């Protein structure tokens, strides 16, 4: 008997679990035309296993996973090891029309609005942190020893990501135990969110080949530093000119960029139900974890929800193309397409409503007194998933970006997650999620 190489058609679901079906690689050409079957109720599967009690789909209906050949990933294995091969898919009705709950379509619609209404395109990158689940004592944070202790995994992960087309920039040992961060080159539109999914699956695969689990869960230890996903956003016009930069304005943020940022801050509570949407997520976002301790805009400040990273003056680098906003309140339990779409729509709303640029905070937000906090417009993020879902339920604008069916499925799924975890100790919640993400 000989083994047959398989390729998987996969989608990233509402809980950011990558699910799908595999078939012999020799069938790929035909399958790119017809897809593989899929079931609506799969969108109500909780990351914890069971189907959510509030499942609007039930037992009926049929869908197709239609592969997007631009996202074809193949990472070769060692001799005798099966390659990792998959294609990211849109979820469509059986006649090929987009399904109203497809996350990639949700992002496509948001990007079409950005282009149609503001004449702008999005360039973005997702910066992921993760931890290797190892028993041995960790090396010091950021140390060369930590980097070397991560070998050969670290070099192989970068090699596999290059092979998968993700364009990794760095492999950085981070602050938490056995934690690494991999920033990647920005990509336009939907490809940026696709890269986030590919990165996680490829890193997990390389770790798995070494018998190690790589966890992207937001928090492994309730009192420790978390694994963030920082989403870097820039906007370009039809001719590719950067739209966020204006040297004459505070922090060089253009008027449009200021309004865009203000929209994100305005909707931050509801957004967190989409970008940091699991029971352990909110604890990562507490102050002094250098995640996103407060809802504010700041320059080069790691406690802000929205950070303006530095503009380098080295090697004749132009400042305008470097200008970006870094949204820090996301984690890997968020579906990247939903998260990016929600952030973009919040930004569009800020521009549409002509919101003024928020003040740029120049210090630790937790050190402000009440009057200063009011002046800087500094607020708190929801302190639990339940609170975040309430903020979403009460925010007609953000809720309105979902079709009624998608909202029902999404809120039902998330409700099921917090209900399942309600009686558990925070460290058990972290352990449960570390086993999944
Ligand atoms: N680990 C931090 C987080 O949870 C981020 C630290 C940093 O890279 O600034 O977001
Ligand atoms: Mg980091």
Image (cartoon, helix red, strand yellow):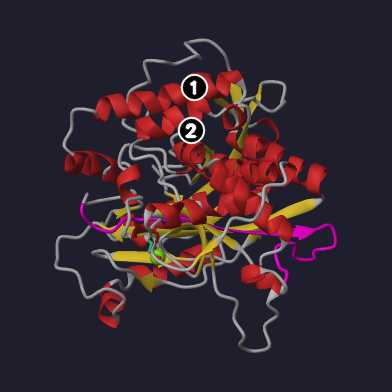
**Residue behind label 2 places its C-beta within 8 angstroms of ligand 1:** no
* On screen, residue 61 above or below 184: above
- Look at the numbered disc 2 and give the secondary structure of its residue: loop
Left/right placement of residue 317 relative to residue 414 reads: right
Estimate the x, y position of residue 86 in percent, counting from the top left: 53, 46
* Residue that appears at 79% across and 66% down: 241
* On screen, residue 364 above or below 282: below
Label the magenta part by its dominant secondary structure.
loop
**Residue behind label 1 places its C-beta within 8 angstroms of ligand 1:** no
Q: Quick check: marks 2 and 1 in contact, CB under 8 Å?
A: yes
Along the line of sight, which residue is nearer the eye, 21 or 2? 21
For label 1, count other residues whose C-alpha is less than 10 Å away and answer few (under 14), some (14-19) or many (20+).
many
User: Hey, which quadrant is residue 96 in on the image?
Assistant: top right
* Residue that appears at 24% across and 44% down: 430
**Residue designated by label 1:** 409
Estimate the x, y position of residue 341 in percent, counting from the top left: 61, 42
Along the line of sight, which residue is nearer the eye, 342 or 433? 342
Q: Which residues are magenta?
A: 223-246
**Residue designated by label 2:** 14
* Residue that sits furthest to the right in the current view: 239
Residue 327 colored in magenta in the image:
no
Going from the N terminus, do you reach mark 2 or mark 1 first?
2
- Which quadrant would the N terminus be assigned to in this image? top left
Along the line of sight, which residue is nearer the eye, 243 or 414? 243
Residue 224 colored in magenta in the image:
yes
């Amino acid at each position: 008997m000989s083994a047959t190489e398989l390729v998987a058609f996969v989608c990233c679901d509402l809980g950011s679990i990558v699910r799908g079906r595999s078939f012999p690689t020799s069938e790929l050409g035909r399958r790119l035309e017809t897809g593989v079957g899929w079931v609506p109720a799969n969108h109500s599967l909780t990351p914890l296993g069971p189907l959510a009690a509030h499942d609007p789909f039930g037992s009926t209906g049929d869908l197709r996973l239609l592969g997007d050949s631009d996202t074809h990933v193949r990472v070769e294995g060692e001799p005798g090891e099966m390659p990792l091969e998959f294609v990211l898919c849109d979820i469509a009705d059986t006649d090929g029309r987009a399904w109203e709950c497809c996350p990639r379509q949700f992002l496509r619609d948001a990007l079409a609005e950005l282009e149609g209404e503001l004449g702008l395109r999005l360039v973005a990158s997702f910066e992921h942190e993760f931890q290797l689940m190892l028993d041995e004592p960790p090396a010091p944070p950021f140390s060369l020893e930590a980097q070397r202790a991560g070998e050969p995994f670290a070099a192989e992960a970068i090699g596999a990501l290059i092979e998968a087309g993700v364009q990794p920039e760095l492999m950085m040992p981070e602050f938490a135990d056995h934690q690494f961060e991999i920033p990647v080159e920005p990509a336009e539109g939907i490809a940026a969110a696709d890269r986030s999914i590919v990165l996680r699956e490829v890193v997990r695969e390389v770790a798995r080949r070494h018998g190690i689990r790589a966890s992207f869960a937001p928090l492994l230890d309730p009192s420790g530093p978390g694994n963030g996903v920082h989403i870097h956003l820039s906007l370009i016009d039809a001719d590719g000119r950067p739209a966020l930069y204006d040297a004459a304005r505070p922090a060089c943020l253009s008027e449009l960029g200021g309004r865009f940022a203000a929209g994100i801050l305005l909707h931050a509570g509801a957004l967190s139900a989409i970008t940091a949407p699991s029971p352990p997520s909110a604890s990562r976002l507490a102050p002094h974890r250098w995640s996103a301790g407060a809802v504010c805009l700041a320059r080069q400040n790691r406690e802000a929800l929205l950070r303006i990273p530095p503009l380098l003056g080295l090697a004749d680098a132009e400042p305008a193309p470097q200008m970006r906003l870094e949204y820090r309140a996301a984690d890997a339990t968020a579906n990247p397409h939903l998260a990016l779409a929600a952030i973009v729509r919040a930004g569009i709303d800020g521009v549409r409503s002509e919101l003024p640029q928020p003040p740029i905070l120049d210090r630790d937000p937790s050190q402000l007194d009440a009057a200063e906090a009011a002046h800087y417009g500094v607020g708190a993020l929801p302190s639990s998933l339940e609170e975040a879902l309430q903020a979403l339920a009460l925010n007609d604008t953000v809720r309105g970006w979902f079709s009624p069916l998608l909202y029902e499925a999404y809120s039902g799924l998330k409700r099921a997650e917090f209900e399942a975890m309600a009686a558990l100790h925070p460290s058990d919640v972290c352990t449960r999620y570390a086993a999944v993400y």
